[in-house]
């Protein structure tokens, strides 16, 4: 069992609060992604779990054992970082064997484990090469293989694909997902790339300004953002927001009447650009820009003075300057509390 429990962890750097008191439980064998913009505290939280940073308060438990007093090597973890430290003057074999030699394993065991990890990462052909001669993508695989070879209970990864070009990144992403599903390693993975997060995660913990604002499966984070920030951060293009006025059971948004949400507090209307269809009863705006995106077109409109985006099928011709009416798909409208910015369900 290698579940991870983060209890009341917080972190200050001098007078700056990098992490507000936060709780997070990661299940055994779960793949959890910490997602958030630069500076929100993802790396700091990961480093606290790893033991590379000391928390200002709180506890970390791995596999039911309190570890926050232990050095990294005694926590049963392995790590892969963005600037993966692969030793260029060592062979791939010796790089992957590095952690195993530290553990003083027998040669035969080292060889078996190196070959298994190299096989998983499809680098068995490269074992005798010097790492300095490898491409970035190959070095990245060596770094992951080295972490997997120690057969850690917990794998911690900080933007491990960020140095790769777009295509290789896509390939490695799918491979990593397959490998980690197979090895059933509990994983915390840090990224600011929402597509990567959605593709890899069993669960995404979205961070914002030192807090976890939502921790849920990707589909849930996408469909039911817990806060306005999450709706605006996840999805490309992000959610649309419009002011709403509520009178009794009805709300009005840019001339469209809708059933009001169950709250008496001021709310804001929100909808994803892909949840709109042209025609019918809807929101009307003047088309500003039309961007062909291959399978569909991204249309930017002015709705009551607000920027509004819609993904529209190619079969509907859209021209700048025209007035376009867009109807929300059933069940797609979301509301956020204007003051707290929390979702109103
Ligand atoms: P990125 O994606 O850019 O790596 P992040 O979400 O991982 O960002 P952290 O590296 O965890 O963010 O940093 C969180 C905040 O804490 C930042 O504002 C950062 O400047 C600050 N911080 C991190 N380490 C230190 C430190 N050693 N001393 C002072 N401030 C720090």
Image (cartoon, rainbow, N blue to C red):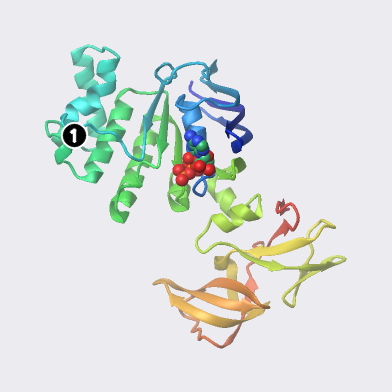
Callout 1: SS: loop
Q: Is residue 32 visible?
A: no
* Vertical relation: 110 (above or below) 11: above
Image-based side of 40 in relation to 167, left or right:
right
Residue sitting at the far front: 14
Residue nearer the viewer, 313 or 341: 341
Residue pointed to by mark 1: 88
The quadrant where residue 332 appears: bottom right
* Vertical relation: 137 (above or below) 124: below
Place of residue 158 in the rendered image (x, y in percent of width and height, measured from the top left): 41, 38
Place of residue 234 in the rendered image (x, y in percent of width and height, measured from the top left): 54, 55
Classify mark 1: residues with Cα within 10 Å, few (<14), some (14-19) or many (20+): some
Q: Which residue corresponds to the image point at 31% horizontal and 45% vertical from the top-left?
A: 172
Residue nearer the viewer, 59 or 188: 59
* Vertical relation: 127 (above or below) 337: above
Image-based side of 96 in relation to 126, left or right:
right
The quadrant where residue 155 appears: top left
The quadrant where residue 94 appears: top left
Note whether ligand 1 is within 8 Å of mark 1: no
Q: Which residue corresponds to the image point at 48% horizontal and 23% vertical from the top-left?
A: 2
Image-based side of 278 in relation to 253, left or right:
left
Q: Is residue 226 visible?
A: yes
């Amino acid at each position: 069992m290698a579940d991870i429990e983060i209890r009341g962890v917080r972190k200050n750097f001098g007078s700056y609060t990098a992490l507000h008191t936060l709780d997070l439980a990661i299940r055994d064998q779960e793949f959890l992604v910490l997602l958030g913009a630069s500076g929100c505290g993802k790396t700091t939280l990961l480093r606290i779990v790893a033991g590379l940073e000391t928390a200002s308060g709180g506890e970390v438990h791995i596999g039911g054992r309190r570890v926050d007093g232990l050095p990294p090597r005694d926590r049963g973890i392995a790590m892969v970082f963005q600037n993966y430290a692969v030793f260029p003057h060592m062979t791939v074999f010796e790089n992957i064997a590095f952690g195993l030699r530290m553990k003083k394993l027998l040669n035969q065991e080292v060889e078996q484990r190196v070959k298994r990890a190299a096989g998983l990462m499809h680098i068995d052909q490269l074992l005798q090469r010097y790492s300095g001669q490898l491409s970035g993508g190959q070095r990245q695989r060596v770094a992951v293989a080295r972490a997997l070879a120690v057969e850690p209970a917990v794998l911690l990864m900080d933007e491990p694909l960020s140095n790769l070009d777009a295509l290789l990144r896509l390939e490695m992403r799918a491979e990593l997902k397959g490998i980690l599903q197979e090895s059933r390693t509990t994983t915390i993975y840090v990224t600011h790339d929402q597509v990567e997060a959605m593709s890899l995660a069993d669960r995404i913990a979205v961070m914002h300004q030192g807090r976890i604002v939502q921790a849920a499966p990707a589909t849930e984070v996408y469909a039911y953002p817990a806060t306005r920030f999450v709706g605006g951060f996840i999805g490309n293009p992000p959610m649309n927001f419009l002011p709403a006025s509520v009178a009794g059971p009805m709300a009005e948004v840019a001339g469209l009447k809708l059933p009001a949400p169950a709250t008496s507090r001021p709310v804001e209307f929100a909808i994803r650009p892909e949840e709109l269809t042209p025609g019918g009863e809807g929101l009307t705006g003047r088309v500003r820009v039309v961007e062909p995106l291959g399978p569909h077109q991204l249309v930017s409109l002015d709705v009551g003075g607000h920027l509004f985006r819609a993904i529209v099928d190619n079969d509907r011709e859209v021209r700048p300057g025209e007035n376009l009416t867009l109807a929300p798909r059933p069940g797609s409208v979301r509301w956020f509390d204007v003051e707290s910015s929390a979702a109103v369900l």
